Image (spheres, rainbow, N blue to C red):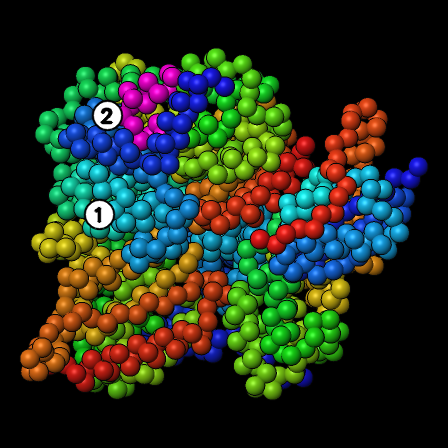
Amino acid sequence: MANYFAGIDVGSTMTKVVILNDGIIASIIGPTGPEQRRLANKVMEEALRKAAISFQKITYIVSTGYGRINVPFSDRQFTEITCHAKGIVNLFSRAKTIIDIGGQDVKGIKIDAHGKILDFVMNDKCAAGSGRFIEVIADTLGVPLDKVGDLSLQSKNPAMISNICTIWAQQEVAASLAEGVPVPDLLAGVHKSLADRISRMVNRLKVEEAVIVTGGGGKNRGLLKALVEQLGHEILVPEEPLITGAIGGALIGKEIVEKAKQNKIPLETKERILEEIEIL
Amino acid sequence: MAEEQKEAKPKKRRTATQAAASIGPMVKEFITGTLQARAEGKKKLAYTFIVCHHEDIFRAMDVIPVWTENFAGICGAKRDAERFLQRAESLGLSRSLCTYALCGIGFDQWREELGQMPPDAPWGGQVRPDFMISSGQILCDPRSKWYQASQQFMPDVPIYNMDLPYPLFQRDRDHREVWSYYHKYIVKQLRGLVAFIEEQTKKKMDYDRLRELVDLSDRTWNLIDETYKLRRAVPSPMGTGDAMNTMVPIAFMMATQRAYDFFLDLKKELEEKIAKGEGEVENEKYRLMWGGGLPAWFALNDFNYFNSKGASFPVETTYRNVEPLYEMDIPETKDPIEHLAWRWLGYWTFWYDKAKKRPGSEPDVERLINWIEEYKIDGVVMHEAFSCRTWHVGLIWQLHQLAKIYKPIPLYVMGKDGKKEKVYRELPSLILESDIIDITSYSEVDTRNKIDAFIETLESIKSNRAA
Amino acid sequence: MSDKQGNIFSVIEKYYKDYGLRAKALKDEGKRVIGYICSFVPLEIITASGCIPFRARGNIHEPITTGDTLLETIVCPYYRSCFDLSVKQRYDFLSGMVIPHGCDSMVRSYSVWSYFLPFPYFHFVNIPTVCDESSFEFFNAELNTFRKSLGKFVGRPITDEDLFKAIRVHNENRDKVRALYEFRKADLPLIPGTELTMLLTVGSSLPIDEANALFDQVLTEIKQRGKSPLKKGPRIFIDGACLDNIELIKLVEELGGNVVADTICNGARDYFPKTDIGGDPIDALAHRYLDKINCPKTYRANKAGTFEGDIASRFGDIGTYAKEFKVDGAILYVYKYCDPFGFEVPARKAYYKSINVPLLHLEDIYSAGTIGQLRTRVQAFLEMIG
């Protein structure tokens, strides 16, 4: 009988679900929105549809991410740090340093060969050190967020932008734009600024290769280029950087089930019902 | 080539005096001197801090001081501190701590890791010392923890940490009731310093030489005070911008003939300027006091900006590290160490008696009031540097208290009965915010806007001033 | 859980939430309550004068407002909160305030405190930074200055006999705290960290003999406690400055950790060292407060000549606690803008590594608003060592 495991990563902007047994069967990425609980249900339903299995068939569910405690149907919750570590080492066996660049925070994680966490650092206190920084500037410049990376690569002369305060940077960018500084230069400057901030934090871990970047920031080629320059290390990126947390969650669930079987301990799981959640 | 980029180096700053202009090369020569001395290996080099009243001891024993605060300031002024600050952060140190110390520790760790100076180290870099002399106590915590943190990377370099306390001001107590046991302690700590240096250098202290040097620094103190008092002239011949340069001999070259001669020259230069009616500013409209705070070393150009608006800075509290010996009522002694300890206490308690006489006053506030009157000051500027608690905590309160107990500006306002009334208002003040060397804390646009607004306030007071 | 047990802890919770309740009542009875901050204030001298020492607290749930108009924001955030509450008149029942030379934040804001608050008595105790023989000589004189000043305020000099009595009572208090900590050594600690820290916090707001009576009651209750209220989890050690509230410890225990030991002010740092009996009482106090209290503010010379030797000597007490309480992991909790602890972070990190205790380093700003961020870090740490 096949065992299915689900990982659900409720981030500040996106909710991701992965269902796997031996390999990934389905993965869904949907917007989180303000009603986390309801949307967690919706995304789970979509994933089940894609996997063509019923909710009852899922052996174990792990939730993670910023909204992990708001997933009533998950059997256990773990931090994104633990889940990303597990997910990444599964995709990259040589991984030693992980950098997760999200919309609201950035994390640096050092792991050993088994994906066990050795140390971690986080920045979740300030917009200027997270993906939000890029979002605000992209908005100021009127450039779609998914285009900023590639556009910034066209720059021959990155502008110098403050990285201490998103508001200051916004003002600087607006002023520079008025003076005629080309948009690619401004974007390159902003990426450089964020990369500097990120590497400052990550350097507290003593970066070792292989370095993996995941999260939304992993899709931004301009940011990746700037990071390579700042860190002085090669960077690898998973094919779909947004789901590594959910993958890790599912894998952790798999480990928990196997361990329970080995040690003959009963498994505690929630009732497999996806209720309609009333919004208060 | 690329279009004009944002300047990596600041524009060359104008100084009001030639003496101030001569400082840059002096400091560079000094740094180069330390590197040379290290290479020659004949004299001992020691990391140490300013305002410890121990230069006389160092000079008497031919120990070359390596002023770590100075080096950090140089990195800041050259706008090349960030990479050392980041290094310190990577070790686990918080950016909220004293950025001088972060810069120093970051630099030291890097130098020790490489086994040589970090690439493009400012002016050749900070030399590896033979020992480190620190001083915590009332002055500041980082001065007690900094070298201890650096020692992690230089475990073979010993530290002597001396306690140099002074009695805090308490209105209901005469400091003379306690200062004899303070004196006893300070003397023992200084003697401990001498013993430590004797052990490190394998030489004995020459007390005659020490006596001479202490006498020299006493005379230098008095000379500096006389020289700076000349800035009371209208127009003022020299401003705080210059003083941030001329602090070098005060802080880094005390107890040397060179420092004394420097101030002889400066005094002469100021006297000549006063005779010609030459001021720091051609058309002096406002006289300001730098009431507190270490300067933003990367933004000293802001003083020129003030100048361009007609504002001069006849006096500052920062780095005015001397008071005239002849106005201190300290006991006489032939022992140079005991005299140094009395000078220390005399300096820190200098304004206590005066402060007690004025209701609501306090030594720092008292000093502000006295200098506002002596130097004919129109407004006070304070600078809050986020990483330094020692010199910046209490500035808001000082301005508050000053405004409460000192209202010297007569203004006419419309009274209740429609007639003009004469009221007395407090002096206007301005608080600037950034840091000593962390340039990311500074916004030039924001600072200059603040200065413009302040100038407008000063102008409006000037035009509404009652007779 | 017996009825009586519920009773004593609900009393404690009452005094914790309405901090100063007892002190207000004592003030109304005509007693003098003297406020203090920091472990370095010699409490025995206050008790010996007949006054009641009262530890001022901040409040992480209250945004700092009035205080910020008078004091810069670059000081220790915990201290800022204490100051804010003081100028908001929460501590109006105090007859005075004693502030030691604990750190720059305290020293540099002394004028602001003494000019703004209406208390009739203010005193600054200048604690030496180094620990030489001459430092003890100086500190003796400084303590006698405090003794004289407080004696003048209460209207009669403080005698050696008064001091001996006070030392005895305060030492008893410390013995009782040690006894409480013994319950944490069990495989499953009989007293959770939240209860213990709440108790110690309340204790520092009571006259010492009332605190002693309260601790006795709790000791009796705990002895009768058959089962621990905790579920077994990683045994956690808290390292830091003043933790005057239970939020961090509550978070750790909610997430499955067992907080079993610490070196915090309002914890082992304050309560484990005892004052020596016999000889000059002032000298005994000087030795306890300057030498026995292990705080980063005190500079200890490197006698070993190596880094490893230095940290083993400076932080050796942590290693002892780690063994005694069988610690699985430690949390180093440092406030932003804290110089004494801030500069020691690399050395402390190296020390924990040398004794093979995993460490989580947290920098915080003393506000309930950061609990969410702390939660992720603490949980990830517990997952890491679990």
From the image, give the main secondary structure of the stretch colored magenta: helix
Vertical arrangement, residue B288 with respect to residue B134, above or below: below
The amino acid sitting under disc 1 is Leu
Q: What element does badge 1 sit on? A: loop
Q: Earlier in the sequence, mark 1 or mark 2?
A: 2
Q: Is residue C68 left or right of residue A250?
A: left
User: In this picture, which residue range is highlighted in magenta?
Assistant: C202-217
Question: How packed is label 1: few (under 14 Cα within 10 Å), some, or many (20 or more)?
Answer: some
Answer whether residue C216 is magenta in the image.
yes
Instruction: Give the quadrant of residue C273.
Output: top left
Residue that numbered label 2 is attached to = C47
**Secondary structure type for disc 2:** helix
With A123 as the anchor, is A214 left or right in this view? right
Q: Nearer the viewer, residue A192 or A5?
A: A5
Q: What residue sits 19% from the left and 37% below the top?
A: C95
Residue C117: assigned label: 1
Location of the C terminus of chain C (image quadrant)? top right
Residue A114 horizontal/vertical position (percent): 79, 39
Q: Residue furthest right?
A: A1
Spot occupied by residue B88 in the image (x, y as percentages of width and height): 55, 52
Image location of residue C52, percent across then percent down: 23, 29
Subunit that carries the residue with mark 1: C
Q: Nearer the viewer, residue B457 or A246?
A: A246
Q: Which residue is pictured at 23% across the width and 82% down the height?
A: B460
The CA span between labels 1 and 2 is 22 Å
Under mark 2, the amino acid is Thr
